[in-house]
Each structure stands twice: as structure tokens, then as C-alpha cells.
Image (cartoon, grey):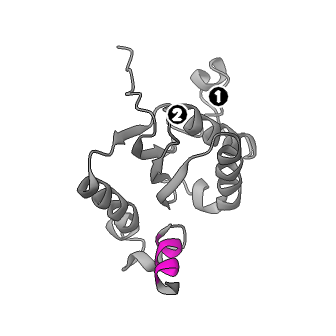
Amino acid sequence: MPHYLRPRRSGACLFLTITLARRGARDLVEHIDILRDAVRRTRADRPFAIDAWVVLPDHMHCVWTLPENDCDFSTRVGLIKARFSRRLPMGQRRASHVFRRERGIWQRRFWEHHIRDETDYRNHVAYCWHNPVKHGYVARPEDWPHSSWHRDHASAART
């Protein structure tokens, strides 16, 4: 398999999709407090701005902005995945996971897209918010509890 080299742009704004290994699992929403703690701890160690985030049962989408002079989003994703995984029960593991000392909760890779401009940014933030509707979990973005939609629209209502 070819070695994929991810772009390295300091202060980049990125759209990420991070998925559990077992599609149809519900670990992310059933253990949302563990996930939130993993994100909080990772941001304390390696700061980044959360522009948008939605957590679905088996995957999540987010838009992050990295600090200036920092381009290491891969380590942040890895830390969040590891911190979340360590606090979950072991469950069934394939031989390949045992060999690599992995818990087998996450897909090994994740998808990233560097945001190009303001239109691209708005489209990806909207994609995060509308993803629960797309998957049929709710009728409106505001009905999904695990989304930054609430944070962003609550703050807009206060201003």
C-alpha cells in the first residue's frame, strides 16, 4: 500500500471525518461523556478551535482551525481516538488489532479536507449540522443533541 502524505499547512482549517471500525455501532453517542473528555484533554495538551462538530452513533464530522505555526492535526486525532478507546471495554478484537496493540474501535485512518475559502468553510459547517438529518436520525439539525449547532445558535441568539 502506498504511503499517504497528508498536507501540512500551519494554522489550517480542516474538515475531518472520523469513523468507528464497526459501522452501525453506537459507541460514540452511548459514551458521549468519554468522547467529550477525550476532546477536552486533547485540546488542553494541543489547542485547536472547534468551528463545528457533530457526533453520530458510529462516526463524527468536525471543522477545526489549528493555531498558527502548528499543522499537526493527525496527532490530535490520534490522541482523541486513543483516549476514548482506553476508557471503553475491550470487546471483540481481530488478530490484526492484537498484533498492532490496537483496540479495534476506530478505523485506522480518517478523512481530512483542507478548507479552501469562505464558501467551502460554510458548506462544511452546514454539512456537519445537517448530517443527522441526512442519516434520518432527526428531522431538523436542532433536534440532534450531539452537535455544535446548539452552541453556535445559542450564542447568536444572545447577541
> How crowded is the residue under tag 1: few (<14 C-alpha within 10 Å), some, or many (20+)?
some
CA separation, marks 1 and 2? Answer: 27 Å
Q: What segment carries the magenta color?
A: 149-156
Asked if residue 125 can be seen in this view, the reply is yes
Which residue, as the protein is rendered here, is positioned at the far left?
Answer: 119
Residue indicated by mark 2: 70
Q: Position of residue 48 (x, y in %)?
A: 56, 47
Q: Nearer the viewer, residue 90 or 56?
A: 56
Circle 1: residue type: Glu
Asked if residue 23 can be seen in this view, the reply is no
Q: Position of residue 81 (x, y in %)?
A: 61, 40
Q: Quadrant of the N terminus?
A: top left
The reply, left or right, for residue 38 in relation to residue 73 is: right
Q: Nearer the viewer, mark 1 or mark 2?
A: 2
Q: Is residue 142 magenta?
A: no
Quick check: 121 above or below 12? below
The reply, left or right, for residue 117 in relation to residue 110 is: left
Looking at the image, tell me whether mark 1 or mark 2 is earlier in sequence order: 2
Instruction: Give residue 26's quadrant in the image.
Output: bottom right
Q: Position of residue 64 (x, y in %)?
A: 47, 49
Q: Secondary structure at mark 2?
A: loop
Circle 2: residue type: Asp
State the residue at coordinates (68%, 23%): 101
Quick check: 97 above or below 17? above
Q: Position of residue 54 (x, y in %)?
A: 48, 61
Q: Nearer the viewer, residue 159 or 126?
A: 159
Q: Nearer the viewer, residue 147 or 68?
A: 68
Residue indicated by mark 1: 102
Quick check: 25 above or below 93? below
State the residue at coordinates (58%, 38%): 76
